[in-house]
Image (cartoon, rainbow, N blue to C red):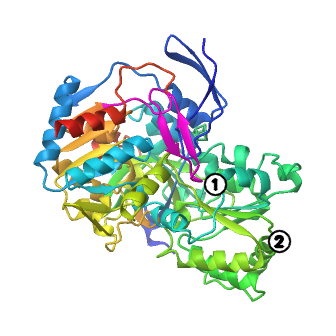
Amino acid sequence: MDFGSFLTNPEIKVKIVTYRDIFQDKAMLENRFGEEYRNRSAIIKLDPADLKQLNLKIGDTVTIKNSFGSVVVKAEESGYETPHRGIAYMPKGPWSITLISDETGGTGVPKFKDISVTITSAKGEKVTEIESLF
Amino acid sequence: MEKNYHVCTGCGLLCDDIEVEAEKNIINKVLTACRIGVAHMKEGKGEAIFRVDNKPVDEAVAISEAATILKNAKNPLIFGLGASTNETQKIAIELAKKINATLDDTSSFCLGSLVEAIIREKIKTCTLDEVRNKADVIIFWGTDPSDSHPRHLSKYSYFPRGKEKQRGWEEERTAIAVDVRKSHTAKICGNYFFQIPPKGDAEFIDALIAGLSGKLPKTSYNYPPKKILELANILKGAKFGVIFAGRGLVNSLENLEPIFRLMKALNEKANFHLMPMVGSCNTMGFNENLFAETGYVNSVKFENGTVLHGPEYSIVESLKAKTVDAALIIGSDPFSILPGSIVKNLLEIPVVSIDSYETLTSRNSKVYINTAVSGVEAGGTATRMDRKKVSFEPFIETNHPSEETILKKIMEAL
Ligand code: SF4
């Protein structure tokens, strides 16, 4: 049994896979400081069971955190038919990259594909503004 | 009213069949382009912007401040250039030589290693036109062109009725996706989508190689051997196969050996090519131009006529180790693409940002110069992802200077 579910503010651990989205890229070209770009970037797509464990509805905000950074984004359902508990998806961009490790082993290549985070509910909190990421 | 064919510089495909309706220097309609292309070409521009310390200045002040920053730096970094013309890139290389700079582009953490293998002819490649006319088995590996190169499937790789592929995708082409996620491209591939776990690519390649020689394919994540054997059989029958390799594949491998092994095994049984899914419109040009000049595709440092090369001269390592003391960033937004934990070091050094868009980098720079959009407001040549040269003329008059003009002026001011 998952200990997290006993906490009042449950916490889950997931690995994030980042992806590109044409609508997000279009919004970025139009205005990367605009609302549409934020709405399409500051999101995380979770397995329905993970959402449930966090006591969340679609559109609620969550805090995603690891030792490299912390952001508040909206939670969504992934819509994938195959279950993927423990794996979540985020669009590439300023929000997801704050969570990437600075460990590179001297190769010049960050571990873009290896993002481990914890997620907690941030119901009622606002999504992190792009200006406050740096 | 003007109506002519133009080139879109929105991605590595450099589509050259774009029709634009423009009147009095305003673009009313962009036809043929994809969603990204339309947004890229239509982006309305106001007055030219020059800023120093976030305050508006005139061009001369911005140029002189940029030159001062570069002159005073012991080890400046020049980064970006993926959306710049070949002409601009060559000037940037000259500039880097002149000021003993570290020079790098996004390929150092994206597809540079694979592009270098292509330039050095270590991997068999082909052109997009050949794919359109001949390809029968197409693999999208760790890439989702439907989102990153939106016209890839319709113009070249899957849907067209090419010269030798008149019956098109319905009968004559098989599209396959290997990815960690069911992307839009993977959906199009239907039953030929092979979902693997993150970092599972190398094992999948070796299982596939085993399958190609009729051995039992095994993976630690228990991928159904039957499915891998089925895939191997399709690949064996390819008369003109092509793998479009993306960052999902390259970033998950320690080195390129698995790709070399796979290409060798495939070409023992069939006829296979590989093309890196280069993202920006002229990253390929940058890699080629720098290679012609130095023998390396990225991550170099010029030092009094000699060239040093290695990961320590990549943007990531040089920012991490804080070895660079100023940065000139051209047409790129590292704050949106590099780990926050590394890129935050840019906030500690003076940055000159030259870009046709306002970005997080331009907002965090000491000098910002807003330049013309290539293909719309500025002309030149660029190199398509399959290494074909494409040239374009500006069709909108602008008061925004081109990157080329700005770099020349900075050179003079030095
Ligand atoms: S596919 Fe790329 S080059 Fe072609 S129109 Fe779209 S953004 Fe422009």
What amino acid is found at the position of numbered circle 2 in the picture? Gly
Q: Farthest residue in the left direction?
A: B72
The label number, if any, that marks residue B265 in the structure image: none
Query: Is residue B305 shown to the viewer in this render?
Result: yes
Q: Is mark 1 within 8 Å of ligand 1?
A: no
Q: CA distance from mark 1 to mark 2?
A: 26 Å
Q: Which chain does the numbered disc 1 sit on?
A: B
Q: Residue at x 67, y 52 (%)?
A: B128
Q: Position of residue A36 (x, y in %)?
A: 48, 33
Q: In the picture, which quadrant includes the C terminus of chain B?
A: top left
Residue where numbered disc 2 is placed: B237
Q: Position of residue B153 (x, y in %)?
A: 70, 48
Q: Quadrant of residue A69?
A: bottom left
What amino acid is found at the position of numbered circle 1 in the picture? Ser
Instruction: Say what secondary structure mark 1 lies in.
Output: loop
Residue B192 is covered by the magenta coloring: no
The label number, if any, that marks residue B183 in the structure image: 1
Q: For the magenta stretch, what is the residue range? A: B370-393
Q: Which chain does the numbered disc 2 sit on?
A: B
What secondary structure is the magenta-colored segment mainly?
A: loop
Q: Position of residue B259 (x, y in %)?
A: 58, 74
Q: Nearer the viewer, residue B304 or B72?
A: B304
Residue B383 is covered by the magenta coloring: yes
Q: Is residue B212 left or right of residue B368?
A: right
